[in-house]
Amino acid sequence: MDIVQHTDVVVLGGGPAGIAAAVAASRRGLKATVIERNSFLGGKATAAEVGTVCGLYHFSKSGGSAYVVNGFAKEFAETLQARSGTQPLHNAEGLHYLPYNIEAFKKICLELISHDNIIIHFNAVLKNVQTENGKIISASVIAEGKPLTIFFKSLIDCSGDSVISSAANLPVLKTDNYQAAAQLFTMEGVAEDNEGRLGLLIVKALKAAIDQDILPEFYDRVYIVQGSLKNNCVSLKIGIPLPVTYAPGNLQELKTVAQSFVENLSRFLIKNVTAFKNASIQHIAPEVGTRTGQRSIGKYILTEEDVLQCRKFDDAIANASWPVEEWGQQRRVSMCYFPEHDFYQVPAVCLQSATITNLFFAGRNISATEKAIASARVMGICLQTGYAAGCLAAAFASGFSQNDAVKQVQKEQL
Ligand SMILES: Cc1cc2nc3c(=O)[nH]c(=O)nc-3n(C[C@H](O)[C@H](O)[C@H](O)COP(=O)(O)OP(=O)(O)OC[C@H]3O[C@@H](n4cnc5c(N)ncnc54)[C@H](O)[C@@H]3O)c2cc1C
């Protein structure tokens, strides 16, 4: 027999968007239930250990990192910065980002949802949803191996992969090839204290080995996670030389290829780069990082033009300041910038389902084209869309108008 629970708002996924959504609903006085398949929180930030939060600050070549976000996203970033003991960094192109400590990220998420109004189910996956009169009324979940049925008033898909839309048989936005996946891992015992110099040493050694056919060409896709060199440890990000299709078996194949890439690369570095002579693998991030997946279809689909022309919307709920960043199957990332000092906005209609009145989306599965999500997927923006979706879902559950909810979000976030 299924265990039955009742809540106001269900949030699928405990990544940056899901945490923000649950906090928003609880701050509106509603009961939120989070369903998370992992045994910890943070999504890609902690499972794939991506290492920096982007999209928090203005796009500007001048030194100081000025927040472009407000409200919950800023609050989260300030706590994360203080607990991680880090400072925002910026590059020559004017992009600013915050390095963070993985354990601090997990702990902050847990503290935020340790609230009377929030229930969390870890090790829980959504099996299916039941729809009635244009609404989704309940979700069947397997939590800690036991069947559970949850009834709710509204729900938010923060799974990153539009899991709820798929379960409800709704059309989704897909592509044949998604952005390239990457694996993060950390090495300890590294005898170098300058990140730039270490990066050059790695690139030089790999290039020489590739030129001499000692290593295959894809070994050029190795990057240092910015700001990660600390206490003789450094985190490396490697591009996985296999297309991301989400076809059956694709994720397992990515994981297998990533594992052998990490092992071979670390062996190579230890043997060929003096700074790694006494180094070893400290740990490998538990998940391969898949950057984009299928997206839900909302009342509006955010486009590349909206992003690059810095479009502002009357129903804006987020300020978004990150270029279109696309990782393919080659070393160089493709970046498409909008004018410095400007930003675009994400409208509420990208978070509201086109067909199901009580379904909302946030994070990297909002209603956006592949190019637009290549910008809007960064965490500074996911935190904002998450918080806004939580407010919209709470308003729906309470019978309040969506317009009023948008105005309230604008006051807090913009
Ligand atoms: C390699 C890589 C590098 C990146 N670098 C950066 C960076 O430097 N800065 C930056 O800001 N962003 C970066 N990103 C992007 C960013 O990490 C993600 O886009 C962001 O975490 C998305 O947040 P989210 O909450 O929407 O989804 P996610 O972080 O993907 O979280 C989704 C959550 O839902 C859970 N879930 C999924 N399906 C189910 C299910 N069926 N049942 C239950 N739970 C489920 C997952 O376990 C997860 O916890 C990077 C991403 C990758 C892959």
Image: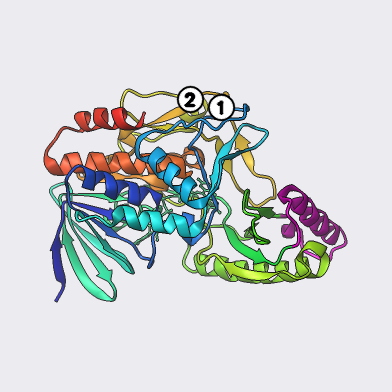
Image quarter in which the C terminus is found: top left
Q: Residue at x 29, y 58 (%)?
A: 167
Q: SS class of the residue under badge 2?
A: loop
Dominant SS in magenta:
helix
Is 120 located above or below residue 271 in the figure?
Answer: above
| Residue toward you, 387 or 131 | 387
Mark 1 vs mark 2, CA separation in Å: 7 Å
CB under 8 Å between discs 1 and 2: yes
Q: How many marks?
A: 2
Q: Which residue is mark 2?
A: 310
Picture coordinates of residue 59 (x, y %)?
55, 30
Is 330 rendered above or below residue 369?
A: below
Q: Residue at x 47, y 47 (%)?
A: 82
**In terms of depth relative to the viewer, which is nearer, 162 or 147?**
147
Asked whether residue 43 appears in the rendered view, the answer is no
Residue ID at (51%, 59%): 48
Range covered by the magenta-colored residues: 191-220
Mark 1 is surrounded, within 10 Å at the Cα level, by few (under 14), some (14 to 19) or many (20 or more) other residues, namely some
Residue 172 belongs to magenta span: no
Report x, y in % for residue 126. 29, 63
Q: Quadrant of the N terminus?
A: bottom left
Location of residue 13 in the rendering, given as x and y in whole percent from the top left corner: 34, 56
| Whether residue 1 is situated above or below residue 43 in the rendered picture | below
- Residue wearing tag 1: 338
For numbered disc 1, what is the local secondary structure?
loop
**In the image, 383: left or right of 262?**
left
Residue type, label 2: Cys
Q: Counting residues from the N terminus, which is met first, the one under dot 1 or under dot 2? A: 2
Tell me which amino acid carries mark 1.
Phe
